[in-house]
Image (cartoon, helix red, strand yellow):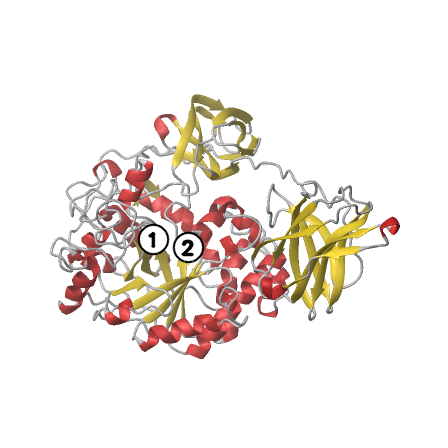
Amino acid sequence: MRQALTSLLIVVAIGCGTQQAVDLQSAVAGESSGLTAAAVLGTVPAGLPPHLGIGLAEQNGQTWMRTSAVAWDYRYMYLTKGWSNNWGFGALDGSFALGYMNDAAAARFTPVFTYYQVNGEAGGAEAQFLAKTQNAATMKTYFSDFKLLMQQARAFGKPVIVHVEPDGFGFLEQQSAGNPNAAAAIASTGLPELAGLPNTVAGWGLAFLQLRKAAGATNVVLAMHVSSWATGVELATNSVTNPLQPIVDQAYAFLSPMGIVANQTGATYDLLAGDPLDRDADFYLTTQGVNKWWDASDTASIASASFNRYAEWLRLWNQTAGKRWMLWQIPVGNSNHLNVANNNASRQGYRDNRAEYFFASGTAHAQKFASVGVVALMFGSGASGQSSYQNDTWTDGQLFLKSRVASFYAAGGVPLSAAGTPADAGTPADAGTPADAGTPVVVPDAGTPVTAPAFTATAAASPASVAPGASTTVTATVTDTGGALTNGIVDLELDDAAGTKVSQQASTAQAFAAGQTRTFSWVVAAPAATGAYHIAAGVFGANWTPMYLWNANATTITVATPVAADPAQYGFEAGAQGFTASGAPITGLTSSTAQKFAGTHSLAVTFSGVAGTQNVRVASPSVPAGKLVSFHVWIPAASKISGIQPYVLQNAAGGWAWTGNWQPVSALKAGAWNTLTVQIPAGASPLFELGVQFATSATWTGTSYVDSISW
């Protein structure tokens, strides 16, 4: 899909002889480098600084920001799955977040949380984002945690930004094929606060607003993350000649009912959030051969990989949605870095030009971004090994961000304009290169309506999961739901999770009759890198214009390294293998992929009862006398399991002799696999039973896992 789409200026006769110029997008081939001057829309949320604020990523208890002598405005951290009980080291009450808020406020920073929990929920990774939102039990736990955050934020009482699920809204757009009415479990979670919301993807977005409202956390500023690749077009580095307004419109149509516009909660999101890049640019170039650099020139074309293009995308979103922006997790790298993995020595890390762009030229570039709606710039690394503000030594021997932000503030910074104040982009658009209005497109006679082609497309891959380098066959079904197409292009792409094209099959000179359905087959070689990939399907006119259809997620392919089978006698790969349990507190046994010691499955042991002792066992195992039997047991954090005992029991001929290895839970590790052994006596009679005995100290609901029992 990454072909240039020619923009048009259409002059259409309307009403009583009047004319209206419909500018679909400035002609991208000669598009000006400047930004269109316009009034900034949307207010700066109450309690935030009246100037462009600068912040950094820093964990709770760290003191670098506090001791840096720089008046930073914001301090942020991630809240991932497990934060609500401090990842097993605290009470399940969300107090960890309150501690972070208080710690930030004590240093006069506004705290910012990136609420990034769906990917940590059981059931898969990014490719299963939509599927997880459709699981009522998962969403009940998920939104219960968010409710705790809102309650603790209300107790904090000062402004706090909560940045909701970076890239999550983008995954939902792609995995739902852009349908905000796709199913999701919201009211069906059973949480009373969400009872009135629809069980849809749109309802998922509204749930955060509703829980803030229910908690009375009026001090919370909610920011919705807008991914630049969500529509299937990675606008900033790859598809740089694609017109921007249609990309914004497509994403806005999906996101607006999720809480950008007026809705049944009575509130909307306060900010939009974006990430200019998730790693240093030269990390991608040196490790993956992918160019993510942006042209920092003030004269760079908007139809290029440039800061000007990104700023124009932000401006169009501001004008369309009426919301201000926070830019988050901006790479710290500068041109003085060594392009090596960062192990904390001076200048280690990878090069980038984003930090230099905003602060190496006084306040001009920061002013440009404030003029398109940005209220905050927050810097931090998106992965280990990237550049850090703690060792980003510049050519003058000073830490770059620390020294430049101090100078930025000392020079007065950048005040934020009020809503409706014209934005001074500094370089007005070049009025000398307008779209050609002298050659208007001929509009058909209104008396002879012409039906334009329109399409739907679905796809399936067989197999849907393949090993790196293996092949799968994609079958795409394309239906013309509008008028006939005489000469078009059917485009199939394999894109990675970020929307970057990996491979492509474009079928040219394709014709469709109105209502016709056709299938297209493509044998796709899987990339070497594992992960989730999307098959995108599009239909275009000849020469790639116009675009009639673009489905960025027609189907998903998973590339995964084959997992070796568990060689143990009891690996539970295909079932419970005869293991049973009866009575409280254990209520069920099943083969599960939620945890594994080896292979792909383990035996899930479900607890839902009062305190007690119970055995998970198999009858008449064929274990020879004298063998050492190994068991592997996974114990969840914060369980009420008090002890575990693997055991063997001889039959009547052996006098029902019991041999066990009792271990108190204090001797075991929670949230991990524990290896336990039992030595069968030499000369033991055939075994009557082999198993694991669990003891619980209180009523508890949860799951432990047993796997890879071998001898």
Dividing the picture into quadrants, the one containing residue 78 is bottom left
> SS of the residue at dot 1?
loop
Q: Which mark is residue 190?
A: none
Kindly identify the amino acid type of the residue bearing the numbered disc 1. Answer: Asp
Task: Residue at 33% x, 57% y: name it.
Answer: 328
Image vertical order of residue 420 relative to residue 681, above or below: below
Left or right of 128 in this view: 604: right
Dividing the picture into quadrants, the one containing residue 371 is bottom left
10 Å crowding of disc 1: few (<14), some (14-19), many (20+)? many
Disc 2/disc 1 C-alpha distance (Å): 9 Å
Question: Which x, y percent locates residue 597?
Answer: 59, 47
Q: Are marks 2 and 1 in contact (CB under 8 Å)?
A: yes
Q: Which residue is mark 2?
A: 166
Task: Residue at 79% x, 45% y: name it.
Answer: 683
Screen quadrant of the C terminus: top right
Question: Which x, y percent locates residue 690?
Answer: 76, 50
Question: Which x, y percent locates residue 240?
Answer: 29, 39
Question: Which x, y percent locates residue 503?
Answer: 41, 30
Image vertical order of residue 70 relative to residue 569, above or below: below
Kindly identify the amino acid type of the residue bearing the numbered disc 2. Answer: Pro
Left or right of 210 in this view: 686: right
Task: Residue at 30% x, 75% y: name it.
Answer: 107
- Tell which of 669 and 23 is nearer to you: 669
Screen quadrant of the N terminus: top left
**From where the camera sits, is residue 18 visible?**
no
Dividing the picture into quadrants, the one containing residue 392 is bottom left
> SS of the residue at dot 2?
loop
Query: Of all residues shown, which one is farthest toward the front?
Result: 682
Query: Of all residues shown, which one is farthest toward the top?
Result: 509
Q: Which residue is mark 1?
A: 275
